Image (cartoon, rainbow, N blue to C red):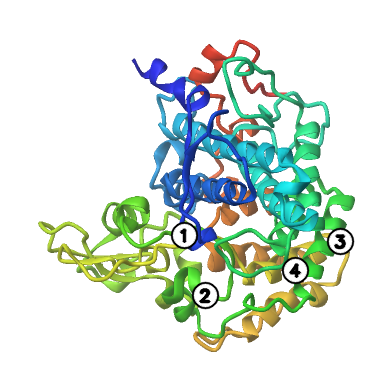
């Protein structure tokens, strides 16, 4: 039965409804020819529908980033992720199957919006500039979805353009006539993603709200993609281009997007913090349900049950608790919470940066703002330090951006860092990703792969010398896709 349930995710109608908070319109319509994009208002609603798909599933939120944190080895909350034991048949983790289906649902929505916007006549749009801006937003969202698909299901780390383990690339709404399709190469996958991002950079407006993508987010996303790929392969061209994009964003004053001095207020403000460039916004109602990992699993299942001695409190870190507990941020990003279950009177110590406080003794105290921090301002400084370190800057020059970031915090006060060697510099930058972004957007996992200690990626040291199988850096293509798409090929170790 499960195999037959899977098909409609691709070939039946995917409902789209835009939130009033996104686009101040509330039409609902499905992806079909009879009820398509026939005017600019519906085009805006279709783009709002793409954002809505990120809200529909925790695969775009806490479960996703908990999986990556487990994969890095810093935590061991998801054993299949920690051990990188994946199987095409999804026996090890349901994320293989569900993440694929939800990501392609989002992609289908993006393609629906892009087709609709492109097909409107000149008379149906306020101006060509507004059409291009809306199209830039939709194409930026498509790039965001596609890179997450590549990071999860393809050989994103490969510098071989012809590596066959690229995207199952779709740029049309899926129907019975195009459901079978072959995947493209890794190099072609990057080309397609960068085409969308370059269009977005050229046509999108500047940042106005973290609830939407923007020109600045398109630049940061491209910089991050280049850093991840270039850092794995010491690709000077990728790294230099990434550094240029990071500098462009840092050197541009963008109203509403900046560092905050008070880290506690950053997390209290949630998606309203000025540090957010793009985040997962949840309207009033069902916030706990739509952020189940943050509101429930991390609150109790992956937390220290209290009371216990201070030296035994680790917030369930498998590695790095000595780093984190010595850092001034520890007491702000972790804390004591109640269980969300009315029958559970225990208290727990966990990651309040994402968990929030939600429910006390089973009583909801406000509709908490469970944010998913797709990108925050401090990461710009950490990325710049890494990029400088990888492109020939001195240790003093390379550590300067991180020290500038730390100087902008007054709660907590973060002392300036001094490094005396290239290895110490790289270790310090690696730890800063962990300390600043842990559980937020997967940055600690990708850093654990491209930063090295004793000649091996940090992930090997974190997992006590466990041999790293590169083909396990991504999931296999789920068996449902392999069965129903006869042109699809499985990831192979090259």
Instruction: Count neighbours of disc 1 (C-alpha within 10 A) and say few if under 14, some if 14 to 19, many if 20 or more.
Output: few
Residue bearing the label numbered 1 = 20
Residue bearing the label numbered 4 = 385
Q: Is mark 1 on a helix, strand or loop?
A: helix
Query: Does residue 490 sit above or below 337 in this rendering?
Result: above
Residue bearing the label numbered 3 = 391
Instruction: Tell us which disc is closer to us: 2 or 4.
Output: 2
Q: How far apart are marks 1 and 4 (CA)?
A: 39 Å
Residue bearing the label numbered 2 = 273
For the C terminus, which image quadrant? top right
Q: Distance between the residues labelled 3 and 4?
A: 10 Å
Disc nearer the start of the sequence (3/4): 4
Q: Nearer the viewer, residue 226 or 304?
A: 226
Instruction: Tell us which disc is closer to us: 2 or 1.
Output: 1
Query: Does residue 465 sit above or below 297 in this rendering?
Result: above
Q: Is mark 3 on a helix, strand or loop?
A: loop
Q: How far apart are marks 1 and 3 (CA)?
A: 45 Å
Quarter of the image where one finds residue 437: bottom right
* Residue 404, horizontal then vertical, whole percent: 70, 82
Q: Residue, x 68% and y 41% (percent of image)?
A: 114
Instruction: Count neighbours of disc 2 (C-alpha within 10 A) and say few if under 14, some if 14 to 19, many if 20 or more.
Output: many
* Residue 237, horizontal then vertical, whole percent: 89, 51
């Amino acid at each position: 039965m499960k195999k037959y349930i899977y098909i409609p995710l691709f070939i039946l109608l995917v409902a789209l409804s835009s939130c009033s908070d996104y686009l101040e319109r509330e039409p609902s319509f499905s992806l079909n020819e009879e009820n398509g994009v026939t005017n600019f208002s519906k085009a805006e609603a279709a783009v709002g529908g793409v954002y809505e798909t990120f809200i529909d599933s925790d695969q775009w939120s806490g479960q996703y980033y908990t999986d990556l944190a487990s994969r890095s080895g810093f935590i061991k909350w998801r054993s299949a992720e920690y051990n990188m034991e994946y199987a095409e048949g999804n026996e090890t983790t349901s994320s293989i199957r569900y993440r694929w289906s939800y990501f392609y649902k989002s992609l289908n929505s993006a393609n629906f919006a892009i087709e609709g916007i492109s097909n409107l006549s000149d008379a149906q749009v306020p101006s060509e500039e507004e059409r291009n801006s809306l199209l830039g937003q939709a194409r930026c969202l498509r790039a965001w979805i596609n890179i997450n698909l590549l990071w999860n299901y393809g050989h994103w780390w490969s510098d071989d353009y012809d590596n066959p383990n690229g995207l199952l690339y779709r740029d049309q709404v899926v129907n019975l006539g195009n459901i079978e399709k072959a995947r493209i190469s890794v190099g072609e996958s990057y080309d397609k993603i960068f085409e969308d991002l370059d269009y977005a950079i050229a046509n999108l407006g500047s940042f106005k709200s973290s609830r939407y993508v923007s020109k600045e987010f398109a630049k940061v996303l491209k910089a991050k993609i280049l850093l991840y790929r270039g850092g794995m392969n010491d690709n000077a061209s990728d790294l230099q281009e990434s550094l240029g994009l990071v500098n462009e964003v840092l050197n541009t004053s963008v109203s509403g997007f900046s560092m905050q001095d008070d880290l506690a207020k950053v997390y209290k403000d949630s998606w309203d913090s000025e540090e957010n460039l793009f985040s997962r916004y949840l309207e009033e109602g069902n916030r706990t349900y739509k952020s189940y990992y943050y509101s429930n699993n991390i609150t109790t299942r992956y937390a220290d049950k209290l009371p216990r001695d201070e030296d035994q409190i680790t917030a369930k870190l498998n590695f790095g608790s000595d780093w984190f507990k010595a850092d001034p941020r520890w007491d702000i990003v972790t804390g004591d919470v109640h269980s969300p279950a009315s029958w559970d009177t225990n208290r727990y110590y966990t990651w309040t940066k994402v968990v929030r406080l939600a429910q006390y003794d089973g009583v909801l105290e406000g509709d908490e703002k469970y944010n998913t921090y797709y990108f925050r301002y401090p990461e710009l400084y950490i990325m710049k330090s890494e990029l400088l370190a990888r492109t020939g800057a001195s240790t003093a020059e390379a550590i300067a951006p991180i020290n500038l970031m730390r100087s902008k915090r007054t709660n907590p006060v973060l002392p300036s860092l001094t490094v005396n060697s290239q290895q110490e510099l790289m270790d310090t930058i690696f730890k800063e990703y962990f300390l600043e972004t842990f559980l937020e957007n997967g940055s600690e996992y990708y850093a654990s792969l491209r930063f090295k200690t004793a000649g091996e990626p940090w992930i090997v040291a974190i997992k006590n010398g466990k041999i790293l199988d590169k083909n396990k850096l991504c999931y296999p293509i789920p068996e449902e896709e392999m069965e129903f798409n006869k042109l699809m090929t499985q990831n192979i170790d090259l």
